[in-house]
Image: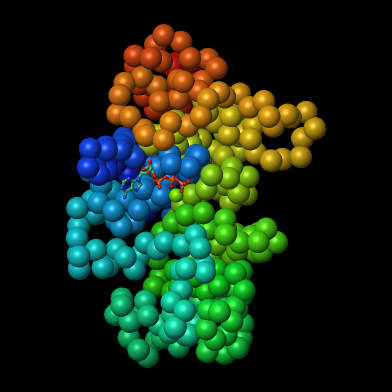
Amino acid sequence: MTQVIEARALGKTFRTGRRVVHAVQGVDLSVVAGEALGIVGESGCGKTTLARMLLRLEEPTAGQVIFNGADITHRRGRALLPFRARAQLVFQNPFDALNPRFTIRRTLAEPLRNFGIPEAEHTARIDAAMARVRLTPASAWLDRYPHELSGGQLQRVVLARALIPGPILIVADEPVSMLDVSVRAGILNLLRAARDDLGLAAIYISHDLALIRYVCERTVVMYLGRIVEEGPTATLIATPRHPYTAALVAAVPVPRVDQDRETLPIKGALSDTPTGGTGCAFRDRCLHAFARCETETPKLRDAGEARRVACHLDA
Ligand SMILES: Nc1ncnc2c1ncn2[C@@H]1O[C@H](COP(=O)(O)OP(=O)(O)OP(=O)(O)O)[C@@H](O)[C@H]1O
Ligand SMILES: [Mg+2]
């Protein structure tokens, strides 16, 4: 299988004044064509920073980003343009994502112009993109402005705009979190259909394991900047190996009478500054921590059945 995107020991450290934040550390992952990878973890664990590095909206401070076989880690400016057309972000908030003064037609023509697609192809491409997100007939929508559309319709336009340059990778950062629950499944189904039809690689970022379970066959779990567990989504949820994954699974709001959501297998609160220190970053919240967790950062290692786990308990 062709790897569309690969991260190798990827890291990002932010320095603002005296504050140093290791937002992402030592992340290895890859996604092949046609596959959807989920990235889950609670607020501040580095999901968006990771996504922005994979899309080269942010330059990594460590490691490499390999896209379609080429190292793009430190490419800049015009050298990134061919990559930009092939790797697209679906924004979280459709109400912010579109220029309110542009008609839908202009919104969709803009990327075509930016990526040098010949004028003669624009109409056909725009119609195809509108059909793909089920806004048909296109003529009924193209002359409208964003304020004339609902949130769900806007998110379809956002999706059409992402698909129109012909990407091979889509990164969706909390793609439906701003939308009404009733329209979420529709958007997720459109994303999935586009992925299947076009053979796209997809990365979905969410703090919501229920959403990830719905769309991603493989999932990585992040905690304070690091991947702590990875595996096929179904098995990862059925038999979590890392105590943090177990806590996330326990927090998924599924209707289960045997589950008291107040008693999660986790303690304490999230420290808001990931430190670069040694030891397991999760140890203070872990019910099973022991001496080794204080002194040694657990490595992410193969745990069989296509799984990886970073936990001393699992060694
Ligand atoms: N530009 C920046 N400058 C300084 N610190 C940053 C910057 N961007 C992110 N951070 C810090 O990096 C860490 C990771 O942030 P990030 O936005 O990647 O988390 P996240 O997992 O996407 O969170 P959320 O679920 O809330 O979106 C946080 O501690 C955040 O404060
Ligand atoms: Mg985020």
Residue that appears at 62% across and 82% down = 136
Residue that appears at 37% across and 80% down = 110
How far from the left and from the top, in percent, is residue 152?
A: 61, 69
Q: Is residue 242 above or below residue 252?
A: above
Left or right, residue 3 beside residue 213? left
Question: In the figure, residue 147 lies in which quadrant?
Answer: bottom right
Left or right, residue 107 beside residue 181? left
Say how many tags the image has.
0
Question: In the figure, residue 196 lies in which quadrant?
Answer: bottom right
Q: Does the image show residue 301?
A: no
Q: Identify which residue, 274 or 306, lies in the foreground.
A: 274
Q: Residue furthest right?
A: 257
Q: Identify which residue, 269 or 289, lies in the foreground.
A: 269
Q: Does the image show residue 57?
A: yes
The quadrant of the rendering that contains the C terminus is top left
Q: Residue furthest top?
A: 291
Residue that appears at 53% across and 25% down = 268
Residue that appears at 35% across and 65% down = 86
How far from the left and from the top, in percent, is residue 3?
A: 37, 50
How far from the left and from the top, in percent, is residue 47?
A: 42, 45
